[in-house]
Amino acid sequence: MAEDVNSIRSIGVIGQGGVGKTSVADALLYAAGAVNRLGRVDDGTSNFDFEPEEIRRKISLSTAVFHFAWKKHSIHLLDMPGYSNFLADTILSLRACTGAIFVLAPAAGELRVEAEKVWARAQELGLPMVAFVTRMDRENADFQAAVEDMKKILGAKPVPIQLPWGSAESFRGVIDLLSMKAWVQTGDNAVREEAIPSELESAAQNARELMIELAADASDEFTERYLENGTLTNEELTEALKQGTLSRRFVPVLCGSGLKGIGAQPLLEAVVRYLGSAADQGKHVGKDPKLGVEIERLPDVHEPFSGIVFKTIVDPFAGRLSMVRVISGKLAADTTVLNTSRDVRERIAHLLQLNGKKQTGVGQAIPGDVVAVAKLKETFTGDTLADEKAPIVYARDTLPPPAISFAIEPKSKGDEEKATQALQKMVEEDPSLELHRDPQTRELILSGVDQLHLEVVIERLKRKYGAEVELKAPKVPYKETIKGRAKAQGKLKKQTGGRGQYGDTWLEVEPLPRGAGFEFVDKIVGGVVPRQYIPAVEKGVREAMAEGFLAHYPMTDIRVTLYDGSYHEVDSSELAFKIAASLGFKNAVAQAKPVLLEPIMAMEITVPDECMGDVIGDLNARRGKVLGVDAKPGSQVIKALVPLAEVLRYSPDLRSMTSGRGSFTMVFSHYEEVPPHLTEKIIKEAEAMRAQKQHA
């Protein structure tokens, strides 16, 4: 590992899914000489997409790391997912980076919402970026269109520092606007420098002048020099590009082809020249875990150690691997650190450097380094590790709530515990997953970003843990309530020889405001129901509410008042009053206009402009209420309230309506009354399921 913070680069390769990020990452490894052959996604030889599910689907499902050295620099390259289903991993992994390569396709109008999300996240973290327009060898490739989209959709200030030499089948290399030379990729993984072809000289000169003009905006000093001299020297230009990139005033733009490796070496040059190290990021702010006051750490080896766990990898055989980005100080093997997020000590036995699926041991890590630590017992993604004598805790990243849920049903009855334990390990690995047992339906519910996300989880569950389960649409947790007020008697009188059973209650039921739950009121006077039986009355009411009245769904938002009754000196008991109260409650509810309630979800749906009409029409057909629409560049954000029953499988429908360019978030909002025409159908279905269970 490097010993100088300034020589370390932790670089995320980011962008939307399907643009060829992994091919660019593989090309960088090959150009640096870190591997002896160019890895390819299509034939399953990529150094980053090595999980069986990734090889089969030909997409990145989680962040992969490869470390290599190039021109006296130590580079950690993090290839990150771009599809919306797996962006949570990217959001978290960007915390490990000192800079990023934003990869985009050479065409107009291809930037999707995923690109906007990762761009916004990188901006939020203050990461300097360079952009790389890949696939210049594809048909109808248009470098300038991609640059214009960066301005229009991302709000970026792109500064092209290269031009493509040709496009599609005639794409040969790149024109470097600093040296004003053409760089051609040769077959032996080398770059040959040539003179700029005469037909491109004028375009290159114009592009260089524009580059100098844009780069002069890096600082007031460079602006003054440009205004005085009408240009900048190459040395000034290089420094201006570095300053402007690190201060995020603009983004240098390069081009090439990841699949053919064209432009990879110039991109490496740009990474070490313009993206900077942890030292360029400056101080990191956290809090004292005991006092709660803000404290700072500098990316300096002489500071106390601190680091963030940005990713967890769980292997059924090797155990848990915690990926750590070192923020300050040194992390060494055979030491003890404090997990300040959980106030527990952890033993660091070994430090590992990841090269794709391979691991090598290292002695220590310094600010900017990315390392893996094996078998930490109580440490999870998002936790802070720090020197015990100088504790600090860094803010945790928040992820959007899961958008889709499925009930998990083991294929074999005996596999439920095995599947549950394995799923809990997978939740450790992927914080965008949630696993819980629904207290009402008793189903095991797995929630995630999208149906594809959960399907991949189920595939891994079978491969890694041998647990086979099925995804089923979860039952909608309906509830019941009343709309009216009613009074009724509940009386139990049994005499079957010996001691009898006697309990007599008069109850009044009335509705409470939505969300109020349950309220029991004791208005007994004169001891007509002895005090010792009052709790039994309340218990009988609660049990009857849990059983439901219309379709056996639990009841809510009801006030029940016990106002009269009678008892028998010998035959009364707690059990008798509990049963009497249950009967009285049901009698009263029958007269109090019982209704079904359904959960309503608050949704935010981001769609391209041209799809908005179709999506709103579809929401209306799903009984949704559109609350408003917020405009964004190239897209619209629709806010709506929609019954859960109508959007249990919304994800594939939205994908179909928007050609994969739409996304949504969904959280529970409140309960509302089910329309009468649907109530009867739901009651019949509930009765049928109940009958089926009784006969099973």
Image (spheres, rainbow, N blue to C red):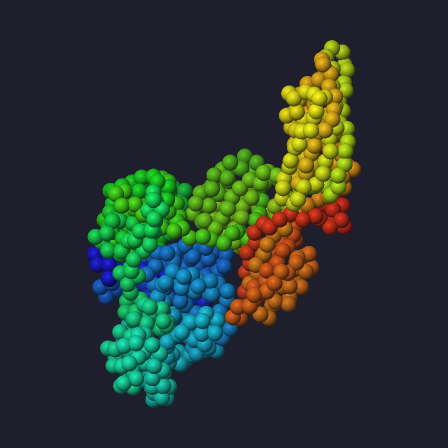
Give the residue at x 37% y 77%: 160
Residue furthest right in the image: 591
Instruction: Please say if 473 is above or below 112.
Output: above
The quadrant in which the C terminus is found is top right
In percent of width and height, residue 335 lies at 25, 42
In percent of width and height, residue 418 lies at 49, 37
Q: Indicate left or right for 516 with 212 as reference.
A: right
In percent of width and height, residue 585 lies at 73, 32
Give the residue at x 47% y 42%: 424
Residue furthest front in the image: 526
Quick one: 377 or 216, which is closer to the camera? 216
The quadrant in which the N terminus is found is bottom left
Residue 204 falls in image quadrant: bottom left
Q: Indicate left or right for 115 with 12 as reference.
A: right
Residue 88 falls in image quadrant: bottom left
Residue 243 falls in image quadrant: bottom left
